[in-house]
Image (spheres, rainbow, N blue to C red):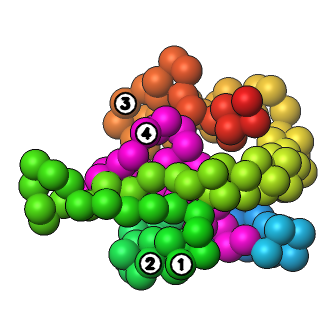
Amino acid sequence: MPESDRLAVWAAFLRAHATVLAKLERELQDERDLPLTWYDVLFQLNAADAELRMQELARSVLLSKSGLTRLVDRMESAGLVARRTCDADRRGTWVGLTEEGRATLRRAAPVHLRGVSEHFVDRLGDEDLAALKAALDKVLGQPAPADPACDEHILN
């Protein structure tokens, strides 16, 4: 494949990523008054099924890690997460979901899942999805876990 075609694939990937994220953001904001970054933090904390240290949360969020402290500050003020100092290491901070955070996540999940299906999954066939997964696993340098955490986990 010519280099220009290879770069066109990269550009298409970036456009698709930005377009889908913008649609997911708009839907969550319009229907649940929740920014996508907040949803991501709530999802990651719920998937961990425990408190996470801020460092661990920063590594697990799928969106930008910059400004995570300020984002958690706002989420704590909204009553969605709670922080506490790590007893073993006073420099460390634990973050966990509050009951309101769990309830917010449960309300937002159907909107997010619908958007992921409508704007991404439903537009691709099974072969396309398998090929894309295989290609992205190569880009990540390792196969994905056999049973990765998914949004459906939060509905339980």
The amino acid type, in three-letter code, at marker 2 is: Asp
Q: CA distance from mark 2 to mark 1?
A: 6 Å
Horizontal side of residue 68 vs 151, given as left or right: left
Mark 3 element type: loop
Residue 142's tag is 3
For label 3, count other residues whose C-alpha is less than 10 Å away and answer few (under 14), some (14-19) or many (20+).
few
Going from N to C along the chain, the mark reached first, 4 or 3, is: 4
Q: Is residue 39 above or below residue 139?
A: below
Residue 50's tag is 4
Going from N to C along the chain, the mark reached first, 3 or 2, is: 2
Q: Is residue 25 above or below residue 139?
A: below
Q: CA distance from mark 3 to mark 2?
A: 34 Å
| In front: label 1 or label 3 | 1
For label 2, the residue is 73
Residue shown at the point (39%, 57%) measured from the top left: 95
Going from N to C along the chain, the mark reached first, 1 or 4, is: 4
Q: Classify residue 11 by image quadrant.
A: bottom right
For label 2, count other residues whose C-alpha is less than 10 Å away and answer few (under 14), some (14-19) or many (20+).
some
Residue 2's tag is none
The amino acid type, in three-letter code, at marker 3 is: Gln
| In front: label 3 or label 2 | 2
Q: CA distance from mark 4 to mark 3?
A: 26 Å
Measured from the top left, where is residue 41 in percent x and y? 53, 59
Does residue 35 show up magenta in the picture?
A: yes
The amino acid type, in three-letter code, at marker 1 is: Ser
Residue 129 visible in image:
no
Q: Which residues are magenta?
A: 34-62
For label 1, the residue is 77
